[in-house]
Image (tube, rainbow, N blue to C red):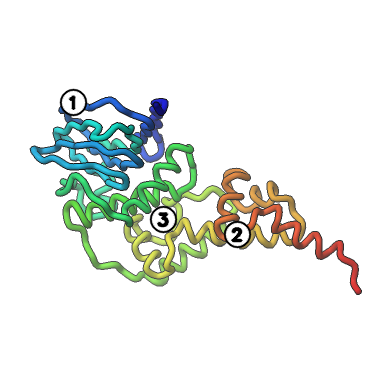
Amino acid sequence: MKKEIRTVVYDDELRIEAYRFEGIVQPFPNHFHDYYVIGFIEDGQRVLSCRNQEYALKKGNILLFNPGDNHACVQSDEGTLDYRGFNITKEVMLDLAEEVAGRRELPVFSKTVIFDEEVTCYLHPLHELVMKGSCEFGKEETLLLLISLLIQRYGQPSPSCIPECPKEIEKACAFMEQHFADRIYLDQICRYAGLSKSTLLRAFTRSKGVTPYSYLENIRIGKAKKLLEQGVPPIEAAMQTGFSDQSHFTNYFNRFIGLAPGLYRDIFLEKEETPNE
């Protein structure tokens, strides 16, 4: 039988708890929490009872528990449960709701079990960032986008109008282009552009087609390419372009360019070593 692994991480910056259960077989009796739970079924099949309804859980399901929602679950096959999730206190959720929806009101999620690929596209990377202890502002950005989407689709309605703010967006871009080598916080960009976090994220994504953090990473990769082309070692290129470590740099470079930084640098070193005919 697969060994049980339970990992819990508290993120001081986001003030949320992330946990990962692997190979779990134990049933969970009827209980409730005084905080929000956003969970994701990585693998396994379970029967969940929540608010007098029964659900057949399977891989890819997302769970949304409001504070006070009583629930219980047991394994429905001979396998095990792989599960990841977040615990968010009501105080933190109030702050998040005010930021993304403009109202300091606790959301009430209308559905307990959903299957939503777009929500998963935010939930899964956010969980990885928290578990790895990332310090990049992309972590906060992803949390805000996740909560905004959940509230819009499954909770209290949020404003659907997305402002354009072209001048403010260009100011945000200019700030990131000037400070790409530094550790940048979302608060800094918002103050410089004169926009709230929610407005910046929505307007920026609509204008540029990518989030602010993705835009910043594109800038960093472009600058790193030029350094590598000049023969700068990958670890130095990573440090000079604002990446937190070489592993982070290598992962992003591979994703954007399709080559490891060292291999990309070697292309230009080989050109210099090749004699002219």
Q: Are marks 3 and 1 in contact (CB under 8 Å)?
A: no
Rendered view: 36 above or below 114 = above
Q: Residue at x 49, y 64 (%)?
A: 173
Q: Nearer the viewer, residue 60 or 151?
A: 60
Give neighbour class at mark 2: few <14, some 14-19, many 20+ (Cα, 10 Å): few
Residue placed under numbered mark 1 in the picture: 29
Q: Residue 167 at what x, y percent from top left?
A: 42, 71
Rendered view: 259 above or below 46 = below
Residue placed under numbered mark 3 in the picture: 191
Amino acid type of disc 2? Answer: Gly
Give neighbour class at mark 1: few <14, some 14-19, many 20+ (Cα, 10 Å): few
Amino acid type of disc 1? Answer: Pro
Q: Residue 277 at what x, y percent from top left?
A: 91, 74
Viewer-side label of 3, 2 = 2
Q: Residue at x 31, y 53 (%)?
A: 119
Dot 1 or dot 2, earlier in sequence: 1
**From this viewpoint, which residue is outermost toward the front?**
78
Amino acid type of disc 3? Answer: Arg
Q: Residue at x 70, y 58 (%)?
A: 264
Separation of residues labelled 3 and 2 (CA atoms): 35 Å
Separation of residues labelled 1 and 2 (CA atoms): 47 Å
Q: Are marks 1 and 2 in contact (CB under 8 Å)?
A: no
Dot 3 or dot 1, earlier in sequence: 1
Residue placed under numbered mark 2 in the picture: 258
Dot 3 or dot 2, earlier in sequence: 3
Q: Nearer the viewer, residue 145 or 185?
A: 145
Residue 223 image-quadrant placement: bottom right
